[in-house]
Amino acid sequence: SPDEASQKAQRLLLQWDHQESANSAAAALFQFWLSQTLAPAYKELMLGTHANIVTSMPDMTRMLNYLDQPSQTKQEFAKIPDEASKIRDQLMISSLTLAYKMLEQTLGKDQHAWQWGQLQKTIFAHPFSKILDNASKTQFDIGPLPRGGSANTVNQSSYRLSDFIQLNGPSFRVVVDVGNWDNSRAINAPGQSGDPASPHYRDLADKWAKGEYFPLLYSRQAVEANTRQRFVLVPTK
């Protein structure tokens, strides 16, 4: 494509290490392209006037199969294989160019400053969040936190198409070293306490978002050596 935005977009993707880290500019472009321009254009091509009926992402396998072999996807495309490839190429170039231009408006003209975590965010909203005043929300809600990954990566992260707010993903991760139990690692979100007044209410959120862990201790000696706080439950008479 002779379009400058298209050329910039292609160079950015060609230099990508294919890691959807929160600080990746290419990941921001790829995910924005995939969900905001390529997927809608693909649905319109396949469904025509009925495309608006499907509000979710299209089936990824079917879309990739079409992009790989366009002449085998739809009957009318198969009649003229060369034309099918041209339609596919135009679909990809036009949607990529549009995605790049939209990101320039959203994240700025300097593509090197783009970050996937500037788009995809995690918010731990308290169940009472909608009825709280702004001061209480600050205490009860946690985030937004920059988030890497996507629906198709390890440490899965699916986002809302309208604003890239994370919808689901693993809140708890654990790696157990059987035989050397004190060497195990874990992370929970967003903290070690459910009390918004506690300093441990949000103490794990940043580590969780970055893919980090804390030691998951098993032996009595290790647990007692690292104990910060002890709760004693005494039954009433």
Image (cartoon, rainbow, N blue to C red):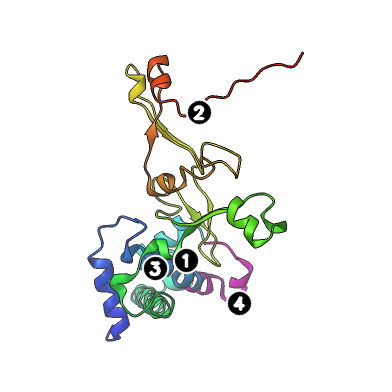
The N terminus lies in quadrant: bottom left
Q: Main secondary structure of the magenta part?
A: helix
The C terminus lies in quadrant: top right
Give the Cα distance between marks 3 and 1.
Answer: 23 Å
Q: Which mark's residue is nearer the viewer, 2 or 4?
A: 2
Nearest to N terminus: mark 3 or mark 4? 4
Q: How many marks?
A: 4
Task: Say which residue label 4 marks.
Answer: 49
What span is colored magenta in the figure? 41-57
The residue carrying pointer 3 sits among few (fewer than 14), some (14 to 19) or many (20 or more) residues within 10 Å by Cα, namely many
Q: Is 132 situated left or right of 176 in this image?
A: right
Q: Amino acid at mark 3?
A: Ser
Q: Which mark's residue is nearer the viewer, 3 or 4?
A: 4
Nearest to N terminus: mark 2 or mark 4? 4
Disc assigned to residue 114? none
Task: Say which residue label 3 marks.
Answer: 71
Give the Cα distance between marks 1 and 2.
Answer: 46 Å
**At 57% across and 24% down in the image, what residue appears?**
231
Q: Which mark's residue is nearer the viewer, 3 or 1?
A: 1
Task: Say which residue label 2 marks.
Answer: 229
Give the Cα distance between marks 1 and 4.
Answer: 19 Å
